Image: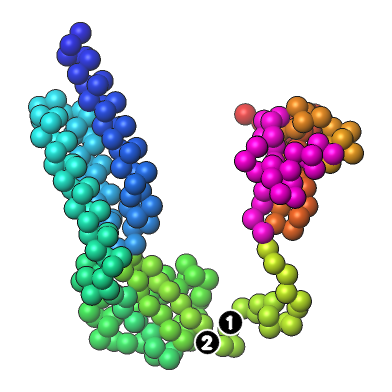
C-alpha cells in the first residue's frame, strides 16, 4: 500500500507545484521569447516528471533544485526588465537579414541561415516573392519580422480616410443561464439585461450564452436552438 501511495503523493505535489510556478512565470515561459525561457520550459518538464515518477530520486533534493532553478529564472527576469545591457547579454539581439530589399550575406552566415530557411519563413508570412520585402529581422525566438515595401503593404482604414471609431472588448453578460455579476455594471447592468430580455420575451434561465460584441450588438444563444439535424454529430 505504501509503495503505491508514495508515487501518488509525489505526483500530486509535483503537479500542484507546477501550477503555482506557471501562475507566477508561466507567461514568460510559454512565450519562448528568448533562449533561456525555452530551455527552462524543457527543464521544468524534466524536473516535474522525475519528482513525480522516479522514486529512486529523493523528493526533497529534487524539490530544492527545482526551486533554485525557478528562483534563478525569476531573478534573471527581474534583472532583464531593469537593465537593457543585461537583457541583451541574456536574451540576444535580432539579426537583420534583409535591409532595403537586399540580402545581408554576412548576417545570414552568422545566423547559420540558408536561403531556403528564409524563403520558408517568408512563405509562412504569405510572401512568395522576396522582392516585396524591404526589411526582414530574425528575432531571438526564431520568428521572422517583416516590413514590406510600400507598394506591397496592405491598405488600412486610415489610407481610405474613413471616419474614426473606437473599439471595445466584448462583454459577456450571461453564461449557463446565469448573469455574470462582475460584468453586469455600467451601461450593461442587471436592470438593462433584464429589460433587454424581457423585450425579447426571454428568461435569463433560457439563455446559454449572451455577449455584447465590440460593435455594441447583443448576441444571444438559447439552450434550445430548435435545430433538428446538427451538422456535427458524433
Apparent side of residue 16 relative to residue 136 in the rendered image (left or right) = left
Q: Secondary structure at mark 1?
A: loop
Q: Is residue 234 left or right of residue 97?
A: right
Locate residue 114: give its quadrant: bottom left
Q: Residues within 10 Å of mark 2 (few under 14, many from 20)?
A: some
The percent position of residue 216, horizontal first and vertical second, equals: 76, 55
Q: Nearer the viewer, residue 17 or 227?
A: 17
The answer to whether residue 172 shows anywhere in this view is no
Q: How far is disc 1 from disc 2 in space, using C-alphas? A: 6 Å
Assess whether residue 189 is covered by the magenta stretch. yes
Q: Quadrant of the N terminus?
A: top left
State the mark number for residue 74.
none
Q: Cβ–Cβ below 8 Å for labels 1 and 2?
A: yes
- Residue at disc 2, secondary structure: loop
- Stretch of the chain drawn in magenta: 168-195
- x 22%, y 70%: residue: 86
Q: Judge left or right: residue 191 versus residue 30.
A: right
Q: Residue drawn 41% across and 80% down? A: 136
Whether residue 51 is in magenta: the answer is: no
**Residue 149's mark?**
2
Rendered location of residue 31, percent (x, y) = 37, 56
Amino acid at each position: 500500500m505504501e509503495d503505491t501511495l508514495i508515487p501518488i503523493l509525489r505526483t500530486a505535489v509535483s503537479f500542484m507545484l507546477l501550477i503555482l510556478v506557471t501562475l507566477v512565470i508561466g507567461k514568460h515561459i510559454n512565450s519562448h521569447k528568448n533562449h533561456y525561457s525555452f530551455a527552462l520550459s524543457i527543464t521544468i518538464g524534466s524536473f516535474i516528471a522525475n519528482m513525480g515518477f522516479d522514486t529512486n530520486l529523493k523528493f526533497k533534493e529534487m524539490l530544492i533544485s527545482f526551486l533554485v532553478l525557478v528562483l534563478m529564472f525569476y531573478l534573471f527576469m527581474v534583472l532583464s526588465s531593469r537593465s537593457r545591457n543585461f537583457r541583451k547579454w541574456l536574451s540576444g539581439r535580432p539579426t537583420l537579414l534583409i535591409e532595403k530589399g537586399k540580402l545581408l550575406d554576412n548576417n545570414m552566415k552568422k545566423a547559420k541561415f540558408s536561403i531556403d530557411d528564409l524563403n520558408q519563413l517568408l512563405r509562412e508570412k504569405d510572401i512568395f516573392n522576396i522582392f516585396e520585402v524591404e526589411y526582414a529581422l530574425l528575432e531571438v525566438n526564431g520568428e521572422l519580422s517583416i516590413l514590406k515595401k510600400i507598394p506591397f503593404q496592405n491598405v488600412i482604414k486610415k489610407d481610405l480616410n474613413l471616419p474614426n471609431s473606437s473599439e471595445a472588448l466584448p462583454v459577456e453578460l450571461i453564461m449557463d443561464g446565469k448573469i455574470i455579476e462582475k460584468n453586469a455594471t455600467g451601461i450593461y447592468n442587471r436592470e438593462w439585461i433584464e429589460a433587454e430580455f424581457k423585450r425579447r420575451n426571454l428568461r435569463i434561465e433560457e439563455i446559454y450564452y449572451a455577449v455584447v460584441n465590440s460593435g455594441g450588438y447583443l448576441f444571444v444563444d438559447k439552450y434550445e436552438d430548435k435545430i433538428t439535424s446538427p451538422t456535427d454529430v458524433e
